[in-house]
Amino acid sequence: MKSATSLLNRTLLNHFMGGIFWLTVLFLIGNILIQPLYLWIRSVNSEPVGNMTFISGSMLNETLPFQLAASMIYVVLMVMFLFSYKHKEASLDFMHSMPVKRRKLLSHALIAGVINIIIPLVITAVILFFERYFLIFDITIMEIVEWFFYTLFVLLVVFAISVFVGFLVNSMFVHMQLVVIVFFLPVVFWGLTVSVADLLYDGIAPTPSTGGDGLMGVVVNNTFPIFAIQQIIDGFTLWKMIIWIGIAVVLIILSYLYYNRSRSENVHQTFNNGWIRDILVAFITISGMLLVGLVISFALPNLTVVYVFAFVIGAIFSYITQEMFFQGTAKINFRWRSILISAISVVVFWIVFIIGWQQYTSYVPDQSSVESVSINGNWSSNNWMSNQGESIMTEDYLFIEDKNVISEGVALHQEAITNEGMPESGVPESFEIIYKMQDGSYVNRSYDNISMENEKYQSMMETLNSGEYSKVYDVVYNIEDSSEINNLELYGIEGYINLESSVEIAEFTDAYQKAAHQVDTEMPMLTNNSNASAASASLSTDGNYYNGNVSIYNPALINKVTEDQNLAEFLGIGSSQNMHTVSLSDDAKESFFRDYETMSFDELSEKYDVESLDDREDVINSINNGGLDASGDKVLLYSPEYMGMEMDVEEVESLADAFIMLGIE
């Protein structure tokens, strides 16, 4: 063996390398299977395996999330085996008896780990370099370099975290548990906290339809394994990567300090520091309390005493379970210090929980500080978006800057806060309100405690369920950059059209937006109380997905539908068992649209000239020829098959629950 003063001890390095050799071989084989072999199979088949085309850019990115997930598991296992000597007294004494300082011993272990990460990646990169000449698609050298260094970045950060966590415990099993806890306990803890808050309070919007990532975004987006995979979809965020590199460096430095001060006699203890164990026990107890409490409360009546019982049982169950895992036996030894710290932590948690969420749910922003508002409910629940990359939509999409609408939104928000629990009468309606503030931030709230008969709710519905704001909620009209769209789908009541060609998508989007001004703004944008939109669209880009309403009266949409199928079939008119027409004067239109939402069929028939259609052929032929008119004097009421073929329209309290409404020529 070389002198302790030599820079590198080859024997010691070989010792560490040999202990993880076959694990590294498995890692290399996995890399080859996930990347080069997959690309070869895809090239031969000329199509993706398993339809995995959800990630853009380099072809290497298609399986990169799976590769990273498997590689992170490999790194954790490698660290566990690399430092397995720490958990055995004889091995630990032998390693520390060698004429090698502890910092040098740790350096050799770290070097061995880094080498076993880099070499498999280098071999895979070399295979990819030569394989690219035989593939039907292009993979550039820069894409391989980018893949190599990003994978290396992710694995080295996981390596640093796993090494540091390993010095906190003296058990391989607990080491593995602790790595999982460090990575995922924050997001699980916060997710359970938000879920319980959503159960106990009105106004919680864990995942808003638009306006930022909501309550879960901050924690989820900064959980490293999730962050590492999200970057493949969203693109690299350099400053976050630099922060994670900094964290990794700090953890390695702390590992050196911790190892130099560690004592061999602590090898028989599960944790090297009792306070770390107590903190973990407290957090896990609270998390388990919330989880078990949620499960129990879902099965029992919504009473305060039931919630208290559920969470108490959850805390006891969680504490006992995690003690068994930490102690490695079902015959656990209770420690009063641990019990006391956990109990105090639970009490403090509930105090902070109650005060914090009460303040959160009672907050209503000042109207003067609101730039625009998005209100999604019965009138716009068909709109949904998932932003994981750069948005292709206009800034105005789903948001209204009208001060009167903002004022009505604030009033409805305040009304929802004062209404505790479900309404005593009427059907409860859900709605989501999202404020875009002057400083660029968002305030998201969601409620389901207002009845449809509520005056403020009705006022908001009448305001938004009109053609005046139809363009705000129109998903195609608000496309700003159609060149980024991979797929655009158009849905009718019973029809479907898929646009995949980038040229076809661009032409349709351009024609639709140019023709939007031809649509009369007086026709309500929706069709019935169930929000059964006559036409909708969904579109996807690299990392983004949008779903929302479109105007069936737009000439470009009508032309696109009639190129492929009959318009009447697309709208589900052919399957309708009940079909009526109503002739309206200009003065009667506004009142009819309002009565359509509130009156029964008999009441509407007495007030307006409702004519039953026995001979539908002329109407269907007219519609197939594009005979829709939002500003016309005739309205078609029909019930598609999905709304109930045997529905007795005379028994329906609101006509909008039984019929879809279309303006026809």
Image: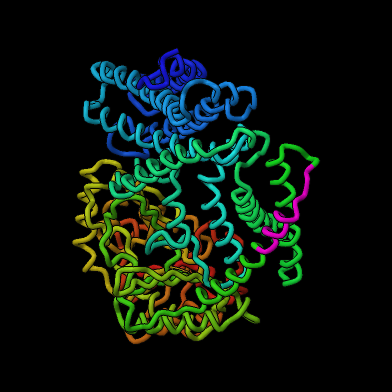
Indicate the position of residue 560 as horizontal and vertical percent values.
Answer: 28, 51
Going by the image, does 533 lie left or right of 454? left
Q: Is residue 387 above or below residue 102?
A: below
Frontmost residue, 283 versus 134: 283
Toward which corner of the image does residue 190 lie, by quadrant? Answer: bottom right
Where does the C terminus fall, quadrant-wise? bottom left
Frontmost residue, 287 versus 92: 92
Going by the image, does 91 lie left or right of 411? right
Q: Is residue 60 above or below residue 391?
A: above
Going by the image, does 613 lie left or right of 633? right
Which residue sits at x=20%, y=50%? 507
Q: Which residues are magenta?
A: 332-344
The verdict on residue 333 being magenta is yes
Res. 107 visible in picture:
yes
Which residue sits at x=53%, y=68%? 658
Indicate the position of residue 590 as horizontal and vertical percent values.
Answer: 37, 83
Indicate the position of residue 56 as horizontal and vertical percent values.
Answer: 31, 39
Q: Is residue 470 above or below residue 34?
A: below
Q: Is residue 617 above or below residue 483?
A: below
The secondary structure that dominates the magenta segment is helix
Q: Tally the numbered discs.
A: 0
Frontmost residue, 72 versus 541: 72
Which residue sits at x=32%, y=80%? 369
Indicate the position of residue 456 as horizontal and vertical percent values.
Answer: 47, 84
The verdict on residue 643 being magenta is no
Which residue sits at x=56%, y=41%? 168
Where does the N terminus fall, quadrant-wise? top left
Frontmost residue, 665 versus 377: 377
